[in-house]
Image: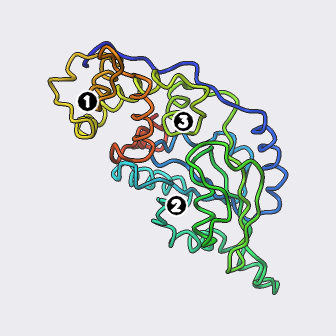
Amino acid sequence: MDGQPMAPIPSIQWFPGHMTKTRRLMEARLKLVDIVVELIDARIPASSRNPEIDRLVGRKPRMILLNKCDSADEVQTKKWLAYYARQNIPAIATDCRSGKGLKAFLPLVRATLSEQLKRRAERGMSGQPIRMMIVGVPNVGKSSLINRLAGSRRTKVADRPGVTRGQQWVTLENGVELLDMPGVLWPKFEDPLVGERLAFTGAIKDDVLDVELLAMRLLWLLREQYASLLAARYRIQPEESDGLDAYELLCLVGRKRGMLISGGEVNTERAAITILDEFRSGKLGKITLDCAPEEDTDVCV
């Protein structure tokens, strides 16, 4: 491996007080909905699944949307879909900003609830709306999903965590009702890889992070897993990055982009922000950092 190995960032944690309130709201509102729709980030499918959702949802019907699939490795996305199929969890790949994959959304909801809808019809209640709760970590695309389904900008959308701060009911034309919950994390990331990958994708506010350290770690991982994409984006020849440690690699990217300050020094903060922004927006290419499990017994993160 080039340079000195860079360990995961151990101390990333972010759990604002309003997230505790959100968990309580989720528990209280579950009885009002027929199905829970969990959005996860297709670039980090394992890391972006809140482990508390399983406990909160219990036996309530659910489905998973691997969102932002346009920025994810297509081979890995297919493997993740196959994994969820083996787990008997309905799942589709979507990109809610472009609308990709959403034609399959409502048909899959109805298929998942087929027995329940059949019982309603038998009792003469077929006109009763399907109510669903939309959940997921911050910045995973819940508001974009609802705006696409509703055909208008019903909810506030921004590429940063913490924009949706209260529950919102949205009624679609076909009578389906959506409950959009604020993004919620969990109190402690036991695995440091989970915390840093959530930070890479913007699920954790940059204000509480060392963005230079975060960008260095991302560059290191990309050189290991997606070296060709990294080289192509920043026009780095293999011989230029050979033997560089993570800080030197950050400086190299900064020089390639002309991010210099007086004395020819690299503005490493500016370079770090650019790298993170370009990863989050998909400009670096189709990248998945959580590999899909080949077997059902272990998730590779």
SS under mark 1 = helix
Q: Say which residue appears at 67% left-offset and 57% top-offset.
A: 134
Amino acid type of the residue tagged 1 in the rendering: Lys
Amino acid type of the residue tagged 2 in the rendering: Cys
Label 2: few (<14), some (14–19) or many (≥20) C-alpha neighbours in 10 Å: many
Height in image: 138 above or below 300? below
Question: Where does residue 75 sit, x and y in percent of width and height?
Answer: 33, 51
The colour scheme used to paint the residues is: rainbow
Image quadrant containing the N terminus: top left
Question: Where does residue 105 sit, x and y in percent of width and height?
Answer: 55, 68
Question: Where does residue 233 sit, x and y in percent of width and height?
Answer: 27, 40
The CA distance from mark 2 to mark 3 is: 19 Å
SS under mark 2 = loop
Residue picked out by circle 1: 256
Sooner in the amino-acid sequence: mark 2 or mark 1? 2
Foreground tag (2 vs 1): 1
- The label on residue 233 is none
The CA distance from mark 1 to mark 3 is: 27 Å
Judge from the rendering whether residue 132 lies leftward or rightward of residue 144; answer left or right: right
Judge from the rendering whether residue 200 lies leftward or rightward of residue 18; answer left or right: left
- The label on residue 198 is 3
Question: Where does residue 36 sit, x and y in percent of width and height?
Answer: 68, 58
Residue picked out by circle 2: 96
The CA distance from mark 2 to mark 1 is: 33 Å
Pointer 2 with pointer 1, Cβ within 8 A:
no
Q: Quadrant of residue 263?
A: top left
